[in-house]
Amino acid sequence: MFPTGSADGDWSACADCASLVKGGDRDLLVMRIAEKLLMRTGAPPGFLQPRIIGAFSCFWAAQRTDGMRSYVIDDLCTPRQRTLIEFFRHSKPSDHPGRGFERAVGDGVYASVYLKDVTELGRIAVYFYDIRSTNRERGHASAALTRLCELADANGVDLVLPVKAYELPPYPVALTDEELMAWYARHGFAEAGKRSEVGSPYMLRVHAAISEPT
C-alpha cells in the first residue's frame, strides 16, 4: 500500500491521463484510474484509491526536480489524499462478509470514505459515504466521526456526505433522516442545499481553520 523507491525515465499514458499528469491534477487522476479499475474489477473506490495513491507515490516523486530520491508519501499527496491515507492508516478492513469496502473505525463502527467529484456541489471532496454502528448508543460512532473530522481539519479539507437512514438487521433500527441530520450538525455539518443522484440531501462540513504554531 505504501511502496518505497523511485521511478525514473520515460512514461506513457492515454491522452486523458497524460493531460491530468501534466496539469498536476492528482485527485482527478486517482479518481479516473479508480473508475476504470472499478469497471474492470468491481472493487469500490474506497478500496482502490488508497492503493492507487500508494502506487503513484513513486511516479509523483520522479516528477520532483530537487534531486531528492527519498520521500514520505504524505509529502507527495494532495491534502484530500492525505486525509484518505490517514483514515486508512487508522482503520482496518471490515470483517463483515459482503462489506469489504468498509473500514472498521471503532468498537463495532464501520465507515466508507473516498475521494469523489460531487458534481451537484461543483467540488472534489473527501466523500464520507456512510457510517454504521453495531454497538449503538454508547458514543462509539460519535468518537469515530470526531476523529475523521479532526483529520479533515488537520489537512484543511472539507467533508461531504449524503444523508440516508437505513435499517441493518439484526441490529436496532437506525436514526431517522432528521435525527441523522441533527447528529451530523453537531459535528459541524450543514445542509448543502443540493441532493445526491438518488435524492438524498447533501451535508457539507467546511474544515476549521488550524492556526500555525508560533
Image: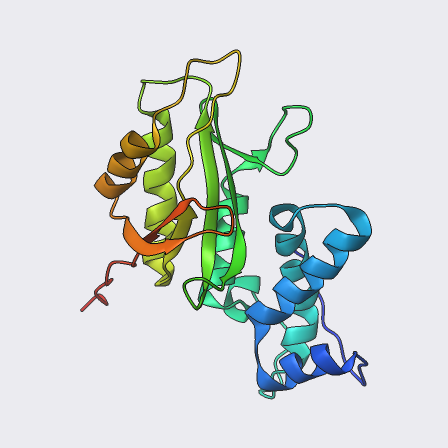
Q: Is residue 39 left or right of residue 132?
A: right
Q: Is residue 51 visible?
A: yes
Task: Residue 182: give x, y in percent of width and height.
Answer: 24, 36
Task: Residue 118: give x, y in percent of width and height.
Answer: 48, 61
Q: Is residue 143 above or below residue 155?
A: above
Q: Is residue 3 visible?
A: no
Task: Residue 113: give x, y in percent of width and height.
Answer: 51, 46
Task: Residue 177: give x, y in percent of width and height.
Answer: 34, 33
| Coloring applied to the structure | rainbow
Q: Is residue 123 left or right of residue 94?
A: left
Residue plotted at (49% across, 64% down): 119
Q: Is residue 45 above or below residue 59?
A: above
Q: Is residue 33 above or below residue 7?
A: above
Q: Quadrant of residue 96?
A: top right
Q: Quadrant of residue 36?
A: bottom right
Front-most of residues 90 and 68: 90
Front-most of residues 44 and 74: 44
The quarter of the picture where the C terminus appears is bottom left
Q: Is residue 212 left or right of residue 78?
A: left
Residue plotted at (68% across, 28% down): 98
Q: Residue furthest left?
A: 214
Residue plotted at (63% across, 55% down): 49
